[in-house]
Amino acid sequence: MAIDKRLQDAINRQVNRELWSAYLYLSMATYFDYKGLGGFASRMKEQKEDESAKKVLNKIKKAGNNLEGLNRDLGKR
């Protein structure tokens, strides 16, 4: 089942945002580790794990939709 182009574009934007947020949380965790703030670092790592880009893509794939064309804009802001 093909995904409508508008929906595909919206999913791409959302996945991009989720991955960007995960990267930001990982960056903050690294900073807090460096500063010796293990509790803050752990919390940021937990937040990174909560990001749902992978969940969104897995649901689309599980529903039998073609993932071709998705993620083509990842990394663009």
Image: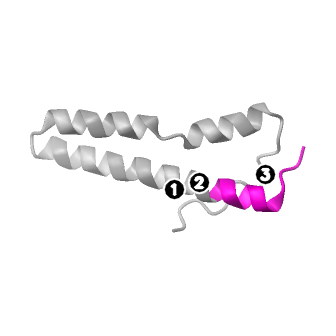
| Circle on res. 14 | 2
Dot 1 alpha-carbon crowd within 10 angstroms: few under 14, some 14 to 19, many 20 or more = some
Give, as a three-letter code, the residue at label 1: Arg
Nearer the observer: mark 3 or 1; the answer is 1
Q: Is residue 64 left or right of residue 42?
A: right
Instruction: From the viewer's perspective, tell me whether residue 37 is left or right of residue 73.
Output: left
Tell us which disc is closer to us: 3 or 2: 2
Picture residue at 53% right of the left edge, 62% below the top: 75
In the picture provided, is 34 more to the left or to the right than 23?
left
Q: CA distance from mark 2 to mark 1?
A: 5 Å
Q: Residue furthest left?
A: 36
Write the residue at 14% across / 45% down.
Answer: 34
Element at badge 3? loop
* Amino acid beneath label 3: Glu
SS category of the residue bearing label 2 = helix
Instruction: State whether residue 71 appears in this view.
Output: no
Chief secondary structure of the magenta span? helix
Q: Position of residue 32 (x, y in %)?
A: 17, 45
Label located before the other in sequence (3 or 1): 1
**Which region of the structure is painted magenta?**
1-12
Q: Which residue is mark 3?
A: 68
Measure the alpha-carbon separation of dots 3 and 2: 16 Å
| Residue 36 x, y percent position in the rendering | 9, 40
Check disc 2: other Cα within 10 Å, few if <14, some if 14-19, many if 20+.
Answer: some
Residue at point 88% right, 49% down?
2
Task: Say above or below: 38 vs 14.
Answer: above
Q: Secondary structure at mark 1?
A: helix
Residue at the disc numbered 1: 17
Depth check: give the residue in front, 15 or 27: 15
The N terminus lies in quadrant: top right
